[in-house]
Image: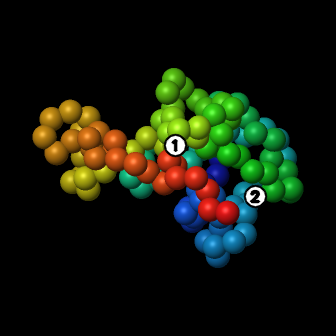
Amino acid sequence: MLATRTGLIQRDGDVVGMDGSSPVAFDAAPGNYAIAIRHRNHLGVMTGAGIPLSSVPVAVDFTNPATATFGTNAQKPVGARMAMWCGEVVADGTVRYVGSNNDRDPSSWPSAAARPPAR
C-alpha cells in the first residue's frame, strides 16, 4: 500500500474528498496503480489491473461490470450494476455467513445499487 485517503461516499456511489465535492487526490508519481475501496460495513474491492494516475483526475466506476476487479466474485451483481458485498450488517462486531443473527440474510435486502440513478 502506497497511500490511503479518506473520502465521502455520496448517495449515487461517487467517492469525493472530505469537502463533499473535490476529487480524492493522491501525492504519488504518475504511473499505474491498483485502486481499492474500503467501507466500514462492506467487503473491500480492488481494481484487477493498474489504473493510470497522473495530475489529471480519473474516474474508476466500480458499478460498471466492465471494470475488472481483483479476485473471483469480488462484487455482487445487482441488476445491471455491480455493488460491494455487505460485510458486518447487523452491527454485532462479527461477520457471520450462516447461523442465527447472520450478516447474509439482511444483506439480501435491496440496496442503493439496485435503484436507478437520480436524473
Q: Position of residue 15 (x, y in %)?
A: 62, 59
Q: Which tag, 2 or 1, sits closer to the chain's start?
A: 2
**In this rendering, is residue 29 above or below 11?**
above
Mark 2 surroundings within 10 Å by alpha-carbon count, few (fewer than 14), some (14 through 19), many (20 or more): few
- Residue 101 visible, this angle: yes
Extreme residue toward the top, this view? 72
The number of numbered discs placed on residues in the rendered structure image is: 2
Q: Which quadrant is the C terminus positioned in?
A: bottom right
Residue 42 coordinates in the image, percent (x, y):
42, 47
Q: Quadrant of residue 36?
A: top right
Quarter occupied by residue 49? top right
Nearest to viewer (mark 2 / mark 1): 1
- Examine the rendered structure and indicate whether residue 67 appears above or below residue 111: above
101 with respect to 110 (left or right): left
Q: Secondary structure at mark 1?
A: strand
Q: Residues within 10 Å of mark 1 (few under 14, many from 20)?
A: many
Label 1, on which residue? Answer: 83
Kindly identify which numbered label has been placed on residue 67.
Answer: none
Report the Cα–Cα distance between label 2 and label 1: 28 Å
Q: Secondary structure at mark 2?
A: loop
Q: On the rendered structure, is 45 left or right of 55?
A: left
Q: Residue at x 73, y 35 (%)?
A: 50
| Residue 38 can be seen in this image | no
Q: From the viewer's side, name the closer residue of 74 and 108.
A: 108
| Residue 47 vertical placement versus 73 (above, below) | below
Q: Nearer the viewer, residue 96 or 64?
A: 64
| Location of residue 64 in the rendering, given as x and y in whole percent from the top left corner | 65, 39
Q: Amino acid at mark 1?
A: Ala
Name the foreground residue: 7 vs 33: 7
Disc 2 marks which residue?
27
